[in-house]
Each structure stands twice: as structure tokens, then as C-alpha cells.
Amino acid sequence: MTDKKIFAGGEFLITDASPEQVFTPEDFTEEHRMIYETTKDFVSKEILPILHKVDAMDRETVLGILAKAGELGLIATDVPEEYGGLGLDKVSTTVVTEATGNTASFTAVYGAHTGIGTLPIVYFGNEDQKSKYLPKLSSGEWCGAYALTEPDAGSDALNARTKAVLSEDGKHYLLNGLKMFVTNGGWANTFIVYAKVDGEHFTGFIVERDFPGVSTGPEEKKMGMHGSSTCSLILEDAKVPVENVLFEIGKGHKIAFNVLNLGRWKLGAATVGGCKACVTDAVKYANTRIQFKVPISSFGMIKTKLANMAIYTYISESMMYRLAGVFDDKLATLDDEAKKSGAENAKAIGEYAAECSITKVYGSESLDYCVDEYVQILGGYGYCAEYAAERAYRDSRINRIWEGTNEINRLLVPGTMMRRALKGRLALFPAAQAIVGELMSYSPLSVQLPDTPLALQEHMVKMTKKIALMLAGVAAQKFQQELTHEQEVLGKIADIVIEVFAMESGLLRALKTISNQGEEKAGLHVAAVKAYVDETIPKIEMWAKQTLAYVEEGDMLRTQLAGVKKLARYQPLDAVSLKREIADRMIELESYPF
């Protein structure tokens, strides 16, 4: 057990964390650093030199890499030791996932195998299933895949039509249906498949490729991730032994939703590695590309691009490791018996479903921003297939679609938090009601901030939380049960909540760095947070006003808009100089500067 403050899922919106309560990359142990360096060394020696073979979808090459990664334990950090894994903490898993995030299509192979292809068995398999399948999946001898999506069931997964019927002898379930877009589909030995028993009870199954009635369709011709196998899974009276039912009949949704939470977090972690690779390659190119007799890295607009790429990466990295630290804190509260229960572990992680969606959305959109600017900095070369930027640009696009589209994840953020509030698990509505009374007497002119490096940014994060709570309260009161149908409103509230978590994660990391290393050494951290908050506050104010303009009218609208104006009152900083400071350090190091 631990005495450390354990935050509930979504609590970051109503409770301010202190720097010492969050985990940051600067808190890595020696073991974390060793794992990171081992993974980076493996990537640089075993994967990057043969990425051309990976991108050509050379089955032998890709599965050979997976097996080599298995020898090092890099695909089994989440698997308990008794089943051939390493049983490491979630920070270690994040470290490995980040370090493999720059491996183009192998990132998809790795992510599908180690996450949604293996974790359902880790968390929901019985003893026999774990003993049979996990050692092979942990070693890379077998490749895993996940089959949920159907032609008529994408984000609406519970609308699946794949059917499972018990055979006459009671020994098998006969599965019939078609699963689409299965990553690793052409190579996998095992598939986590969802079907409705008797057409009603949504249930998970472990399906082996060699089971009778199991086949795969042709490879999809994709925009990106060319080196990963993506095809349909065809089930025609597929004979699946009854002992391969995963967890319980009718409880497949618990597996699917909990595992998708983990998949979203892992995807976010992988995007950090992708962002860092873009940053490093872009700044190296900018230093060597000469135009008008000087490197283009000396141009102000290029510096702005480089700095923005680094800032988004910094904020994303801060969010991912903060969440990994929260996972580990929560898991540490489980007693010895609960720690052995995969379902209990999954439940503990599922507490942070909203945060998983937040990091997935933010990470995928940050990587899309970085790859776009990466191409732009390389100019015409970035558009040519012989340069890594072109592939990175294409590969990145899928991240906003799989593991739940970013639109679905945006809806999940306020939806999850409000459902918990209605059940009394999150004091969201009392906090929102308190804001109304507070605004009547609040005057931004009377606020006296301490003379500390990030006092203004800390204040604005708190004000942004109030804006988010105010909007949630207003929207809930206006629409009540119909709020679920007001997607535009929920989307804007989600955007503000996402930025609250983003700004606060960067802020807490910078404050912790100041505390541990001193203000001078934390200079770039401070500059990044200041520049990020400076650009974010005006966007939040706009989203809030747009939402209120739809929800309210007349005097009430004017009152609410005045409240937002009070909370968002902000004097812009000299962001040009802040970004030049960050860019100059990047140009000097020729890499990500944090």
C-alpha cells in the first residue's frame, strides 16, 4: 500500500496537483534510463537500417524484429514474470513504447502486438489461457492481433454482427462474421475476437489462425503504415474451443473498453517518440540547408516552426509520463491478491479512461503537427519518398483514427467525467456551482500574483479549470439528458479540458524542474510553458464564448460572457523571444532540447 495522494480519474479538473505529486521524465530511475537506452540502441541497430524492408512489408524481416525484441523483453514489459514477461511498472512500458515510436510501420506492429493483441489475455485471461498463450506472445514466437471493427460496427463496437453459437456437442463455439482493418491480420497467430453469443451477448474469444473456419482476406492498400499487415478476418463456422472464451459470456465490453484505454495511452506514448524523431531530423536538415548564403535554421520563421515542434513534444511528453505515474500510483494501492487479478489491474487503469482519451487525442494531433512542419522545413525534399519526412507524414495520419477516432475520444472525455459526477464519484457539479457564486465577486484586477517564474501560468491554468467547470455546468443545466446529442458543445468542452491537462502537465513538470535543478537549468522548461500558455489561453476564451453563444441568449448570455472575460483576462507575453530561445538551443544541440 502507499500513503501517496491518489487522484481519481478526472479529478485534475477540480483539484490542483503539486509538482511533487506528478511523475516526469526527469524522475527516471537508473533502471528506466537503462531500459530507454537499451530500446533506443535496439531501434538504431536492428530496425532503422532496414526500415526499407519493413516498409516493403517483408514478413520475415518484420517478424524477425519482433522476435529479437522478444529476446530483450521489449514486448513483454506488461506481462507478469510467471508467463515469460518482465512485469515492469507502467513508466517502463511508456519508456519502451516511446523509444519505438520512430520505427515507421513497425510502430503499428509493435503497438498492436504488445497492447490490444496481448493485454486482453494478461488482464482477462484465466490461468490456463495465460499459461498457454502469454509465453509465446511475450517471446515474439507468436504475433498477436485484435479484431473488433466490422463493416457496420466501427466506433459503435457493440453493434457487432459476428455471431457465436454453441456446437451440438458443447465443445466449441461456431463463429460467423467479418472483421475489418485487423492490424497484424496477415501475420498473427492469435486474434482477440468479439462476437455475440446467440446473437445477443457480446463476448471475447481467443481465436487461433489454425482453427477450422478461420481465414484472412487480402492486404489493404493503405495511405501509410505500408509495412504493417492490415486485412480482414473471415470467420465461417470457425470452431473455437469453449475454453477459449475470454473472461465471461456477455462481458466482452469490459475487455474491449478497458483494453482500448491502454491502447490509447500506448499510442500517445509512441507519438512522443515520433515527434522527437521529427524534431531532430528537421533541425539537422535546417542546419545544413543553405539559402541566401546562410543555414535556413537562422531564419525567424524556421525557428518558430522548430520551437513549436519542440514545445508540443514537451507538453505531450509531460502528459504521457504524468499519466504513467498515475497508473503506477493507483496500482500500488492494490493488495497482493488484487495485484494478481488482471481484471482488478484493468479496473484500476480504467479509472483514468478520460485521461487515456486526452493523451491519445493530444499525442496524435501533436505528431500530425510535427510531421507537417517537418515536411515543410525540408521543402521539396520532404515531399520525396527517399526522405523520411514523406513516410512520417503518411504514417502519422492513422493515429487520429484507430483506437477510437479523435472525435469519439473527445466525446468520451466530458461524457466519462459527467457520468462519474452523476454517480457521486467526481464532485464536478458542486465545483461548477461554486464557480457561479465566485464570479459575482471575482475581480481579475484584484489578483496579486507572487513573484515566481511561472506564477501567471499557474494562475491561468486555475482560471481555465473554472472556465471548463462553468461551461460543463451551464451545458448540463440547459440540456440535461439531451446533452449527449449536443456533440459540438461536448467537443468544445473536451478541447478545453484537454488543454487544462496539457498546460498543467507542462507547468508541473517545469515547476518540479525548478525545484530540483534550479531556475537557471530549468530555463527552457519555463520558456516552453510560457509560450504554450500564451498561445492557448486565447483559443480557450474563443471556444468558451462560441459555446455560450449557442447555449445561452439575452441577459444570461451577456452575464456568462462577462464571466469568461474575467476568467480569461490575460496580458500576452513576448512569445517571439521565448521561441527563439528554445530554437537556438535546438540548433546548437541538433536535437530535441529537453
Image (spheres, rainbow, N blue to C red):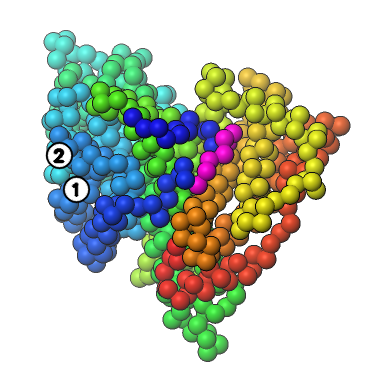
Q: Residue at x 23, y 58 (%)?
A: 38
Q: Residues within 10 Å of mark 2 (few under 14, many from 20)?
A: some
First of labels 2, 1 by sequence position: 1
Please name the residue that numbered disc 2 is placed on: 84
Residue 1 place in picture, x, y as percent: 33, 30
Q: Residues within 10 Å of mark 1 (few under 14, many from 20)?
A: many
Question: In screen coordinates, is 426 left or right of 550?
Answer: left
- Which amino acid is tagged 1? Gly
Q: Residue at x 39, y 46 (%)?
A: 267
Q: Main secondary structure of the magenta part?
A: loop
Helix or strand or loop: what does disc 1 sit on? loop
Q: Residue at x 55, y 51 (%)?
A: 507
**Above or below for 348 versus 358:** above
Where, quadrant-wise, is the C terminus in this rendering? bottom left
In this view of the protein, which residue sits in the foreground, 237 or 592?
592
The disc at residue 73 is 1
Q: Is residue 110 visible?
A: yes
In this view of the protein, which residue sits in the foreground, 315 or 254?
315
Q: Quadrant of residue 279?
A: bottom left
In this view of the protein, which residue sits in the foreground, 304 or 249?
304
Query: Magenta segment, which residues?
Result: 13-19
